[in-house]
Every structure is written in structure tokens, then in C-alpha cells.
Image (cartoon, rainbow, N blue to C red):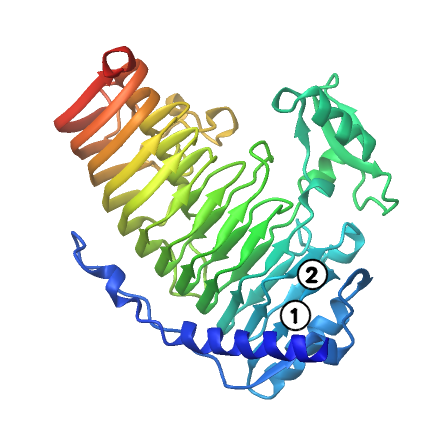
Amino acid sequence: MKRFITGIFAFMLACGVSAQNKDYSRYYDGLPIEIKQVSAITFPDRSTDIIRHGAVGDGVTLCTGAIQSAIDSLAALGGGRVEIPMGVWLTGPLELRSNINLVLDKNAILYFSPDKSLYVDSEPKASRFRPCITAVRCTNIGITGNGMIDGNGAQWRPVKRGKVSDVEWRDYRDMGGVELQDGNMWYPWKMKSGYPDMAATPEKQEKKRNDLFRVFYCENILLEGVTFQNAPKFHVHPFNSRNIIMDGITVRCPWNAQNGDAIDLSDCHRCLIVNSTVDAGDDGLCLKSSEHKKGTDINGVQDVLLRYNTVYHAHGGFVIGSEDICGITRVVATDCRFSGTDTGLRFKSAISRGGRTQDIYISDIMMADIRGEAIVFECTYNLANANVKPGEVDQTKPYNIPEFTDIHISDIICRGCKTGIKASGLAGYDCVHDIDISDCTLVYTRDSTIIDPSTARLNLNNVRLIPAKKAE
């Protein structure tokens, strides 16, 4: 057994060295605009494994302390690789440090405990539970290898009755929980697992759900080869961070997972997402920008390249919004395929959520079996919960009005969508303009286009909109 583990570690070490020596510049060849490239991320040539710190991979022993000890002790020496070998490693929340690369063996499962008490934040003002994996103001952090990180999300997520079969609904009931809203919503409350609830009501506990990987104000983030699955809420969610590489990761959860976003970049600069696969319950590849954060020069989204990715189920294959307050600019999405998403290319925002989105280039996206729109622009997203309604706006005050402009979409093929292109802005505002869509073929089942010409100005050039019957 020791010889086997030693061999695995040697293999992982070889893979880790080659990963750090990758030349990512080739992904930037032939782009329509110049965007700032990511820089290679390296880690010190030093390692430890979690077994040396007392971890037991039997799926029963709680290993939080041992894993965190491995991270902290190696960080104190200057960093390196924390190796997670074959096994099922039960853990609570973990915090990465600068210069730490968490390396997972292919047969390693990092499995997060259903005990919600482990995730309670000691900060009295915290509105949510601690993320499963987090880092704050770190430089050089990585999660690599070919292992799996499982957030055990079924113990956290509410479920809508209309989104599951009778068999699945019985499975949730068998876990315990409560049915509210006239039996239309199941909440993981008073579960048969026996772990205590950590809020006054099921609804309040649901609002405290955590993300699987959520980092803040970090620079140089490498995620490679690993599978992130079954998050309590969002899966991969960096905030106000720079120089991010996601290469060959997989993100997956049930299609009906409430708020199960896959990859969200929130106010991040210089990012590369390549060779990755998404099959999730909410947005797939998503860019967001919220309110300006003090104490950092990283606000808004800039210089992002997405290439050679696959999205199966998601609310949108490639999504911008719904928040884009500090602006989103210099983004290229190309050479991707979407199969079975609710929408293909989705641009969504609203009053109080909006900013300027520009210099966006999207090309060579192949789509099939899109449930709704192949391409959609909407400026009234979640309007029922907006702070201000369109008719209430005082135009002498800033209300974060959305603006989608200078967006170029070309060489899109979509076989099967309900609507080819849908777009609308806000009356009285120039929210959707200078949108160029060219050299596309969209096969639709209901509407070729639904475009409000009074609020949205789109330029269509050589766009073939073909009803499904004529395409047979």
C-alpha cells in the first residue's frame, strides 16, 4: 500500500511540475481584440501530505484539523504542494494560504460534512455560512490534480416540487426535511442525519447557504483538472481577484439545483477558462460585477478569455449579469459548445444592477437543444425584487442603469431553440445598442426573433433564421 501511494505521489509531482510549466499564450492566438494575458502560476518545490498530519480517508473520520494543519505548516515554510491521496476525506471548511497548491489524486474525494455547525462564521456580522474552501488576500493558490471536491449540497439546498419526479421527491422526504409553501418547496430542515439546524427557520437557514469555492482579493489562482460538484450554492466563485486560470475543470450538480451556478467570475481581471466542462443547475460560465469595493484596485470585469469549453445543462451557457455595476469589458468567448442549456448567450441586468458592458466578442459557439433563446438581452431581470422600478426612476440620481453596447456575436450555429434572438431594453434609456450579430444560423421552433425596436438596436448581417420544420 505504501509503495502504491508513493507511486501516486510521484505521478502527481510530475503532473504538478508540467502544469506549472504550461504555455497559456497559445490560447490567445487569433483573437479579434488584444486582451491582457494570464501569467503562469508556480509554487515552491516542497510538499507534504495530509496523512502525515493525521488525516484518515475512510469517509467517517473528520479531517478538518489535519488538512488545515498540513496547509498551515507548509505555508509557514513558504508554501508548496499539499497532497491529498486516494480516499474519501470528510472535512469541514478549509482556508487556503499563499503559495499553497492543493493536489488531489484521481481517486481522492474531498467530501464536505453535512454538519452545518462546522460552517458557522465567528464574525457576528456574517450573513452566510463559511465557504467550503476559501482564501482572503492570498497570492498563488491552486487546486489541481484529477480528484473530486463534493460540497454535499443535497443537505443544504431547497427543492422545488415542480422540478423533480415523484421518485426524487420521495427520496428527499426520506432524508427528512420539511415541506412548505403548500407542499411546493422542500427544505433540508430537521434532517434524519441528526445534525442540528443553525437558524431560526428553514427559510433563514437557506439564505445562509455557502459556496463550494469562494475566494476574495486574491492574485494568481490556478484550478486545473479537478471536479467541483454538489455545492450548497455556487460552485467556483472568485471575487475581486486577478490572474485566474481554470484549465480542464469539471463543474457539476443536478440540473434542478437551486442557485447552482457553476463558474462565476465576480469583479475579476485577467482570467482564462479553457477545456472545462459544466453541467449545472443555474448559470454556466458567468461574469458579474457588483458595487465598488474599497481597498482593492480590482473592480469590474476585464480581460477574460473563455475557449474550448462545454456546457450541458445551465440556465445560460455564457452569461453576463445580472450585476454588471462596475462594468465588464474586453471579453472573448470562442470555440465552445452548449448542449441542452436553457438559453445560449444570455445578457441580463436591471435598474439598480446595471453598468456598462462593452468590447465583448463571441464567436464559433456551437449549440444544440436550447430550451429558450439562443441569444437574449434583457434589462428587467428579476424586476419584482428590484429596488427601483423603471417608472420610479429620478433621472437626476444614479440608479445603476444597465447598458449593453459594442458587443460582437458571429459564427454561431444553433440547431434547436424556441426563439432565435430576443432583445429589449428600458423605455427612455439607451440600454441595448450597437450589437452586431453576423454569419449565424439559428434553427428555431417558435419565434425567429422577438426584438423591441424602440428599446434595443441590433444589427443583423447574414443571420439565417430557419424554422425547425424547414430544416428537417
Label disc, if present, on residue 26 of the rendered structure? none
Label disc, if present, on residue 93 of the rendered structure? 2
Residue drawn at 75 percent across, 54 percent down: 113
Q: Earlier in the sequence, mark 2 or mark 1?
A: 1
Which sits in the foreground, 3 or 296? 3
Can residue 295 be seen in this snapshot? no
Q: Position of residue 203 (x, y in %)?
A: 72, 34
Give, as a three-letter code, the residue at label 2: Pro
In the rendered structure, the answer to whether residue 345 lies left or right of residue 263 reads left
Q: How many marks?
A: 2
The relative height of residue 370 versus residue 96 in the rendered view (above or below) is above
- Residue bearing mark 1: 85
Give the secondary structure at mark 2.
loop
User: Which quarter of the rendering shows the N terminus?
Assistant: bottom right
Q: Quadrant of residue 62?
A: bottom right
Give, as a three-letter code, the residue at label 1: Pro
In the rendered structure, the answer to whether residue 20 lies left or right of residue 94 reads left
Foreground: disc 2 or disc 1 = 1
Q: CA distance from mark 2 to mark 1?
A: 19 Å
Residue drawn at 41 percent across, 63 percent down: 244
Q: Position of residue 243 (x, y in %)?
A: 38, 66
Residue lying farthest to the bottom in this orientation: 77
In the rendered structure, the answer to whether residue 216 lies left or right of residue 42 reads right
Residue drawn at 30 percent across, 26 percent down: 415
Contact (CB < 8 A) between labels 2 and 1? no
Q: Position of residue 286 (x, y in %)?
A: 41, 44
Q: Quadrant of residue 171?
A: top right
The relative height of residue 28 versus residue 438 in the rendered view (above or below) is below
Binning the other alpha carbons within 10 Å of mark 1 as few (below 14), some (14 to 19) or many (20 upward) gives many
The relative height of residue 24 versus residue 380 in the rendered view (above or below) is below
